[in-house]
Every structure is written in structure tokens, then in C-alpha cells.
Amino acid sequence: LEVSAEKGNQILVPKGFAHGFVTLVPDTEVLYKVTDTYSQAHDRSIRFDDPAIGIEWPSLTGGFQLSDKDLKAPLLAAAEVFA
């Protein structure tokens, strides 16, 4: 699914669902609306390129720039379940 300012589209991610994104152009601004304030105690991560998930991410010149948190994310099979 591709969203853009030009299209004016949005995505609703239900509370508790895993989500991820990649930007395809430099200096992209991503805006979130959330149901509550951020809680590090409730934050979970899974590895974006886990073969078990099977997402076909686009090829990017220079590769992906990931946060330290995303670099340390476990595979889905080893991820802590959010309840």
C-alpha cells in the first residue's frame, strides 16, 4: 500500500497491531494519531525483514536506515507477545 500527500490517503492501524513503513523519498514527514500517550513499557518490536512475515520491501539505494531499537528487534517467533 502506498500513501502520499498528493493522494491524501491515510491508514488506520488498530490498537495493538504491528505496523511498519518505509519512506521512498528523502525528508519524508510521517504523522501519527494515537489513542493514548506513548508508553515505553507497552512498546514491542519485531524484525522488519523476518522471512516468516514475508513482506516484500522495496530495494533502496544505500539500504535501509534503521533505529537502534529496530536493529535489535527480535524475529516474530521470539517476540514478546503484547497483551
Image: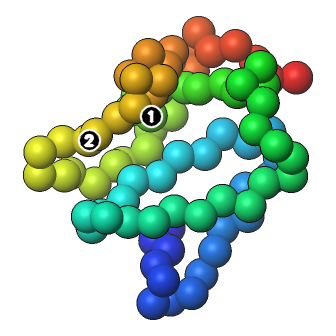
Q: Which mark is residue 73?
A: none
Q: Nearer the viewer, residue 27 or 83?
A: 27
For the point 66% across and 59% down, the residue is 32
Residue assigned mark 1: 48
Which image quadrant is residue 33 in?
Answer: bottom right
Q: Residue at x 59, y 26 (%)?
A: 45
Labels 2 and 1 touching (C-beta < 8 A): yes
Residue 35 percent across, percent down from the top left: 86, 52
Q: Quadrant of the C terminus?
A: top right
Measuring from the top left, give residue 49's x and y in whole percent.
39, 32
Q: Is residue 15 above or below residue 43?
A: below
Reply above or below: 58 against 41. Answer: below
Q: Is residue 29 left or right of residue 26?
A: right
The foreground one among 19 and 69 is: 69
Going by the numbered disc 1, the residue's amino acid type is Phe
Please name the residue that numbered disc 2 is placed on. Answer: 64
Q: Amino acid at mark 2?
A: Phe
Taking the image as shown, residue 66 lies to the left or right of residue 78, namely left
x then y, percent, for residue 9:
59, 81
- Residue 52 visible in the picture: no
Task: Classify mark 2: helix, strand or loop.
Answer: loop
Kindly identify the residue that appears in the image at 45 percent across and 66 percent down. 29
Within-10-Å neighbours for mark 2: few <14, some 14–19, many 20+ = few
Residue, x 66% and y 67% (percent of image)? 11
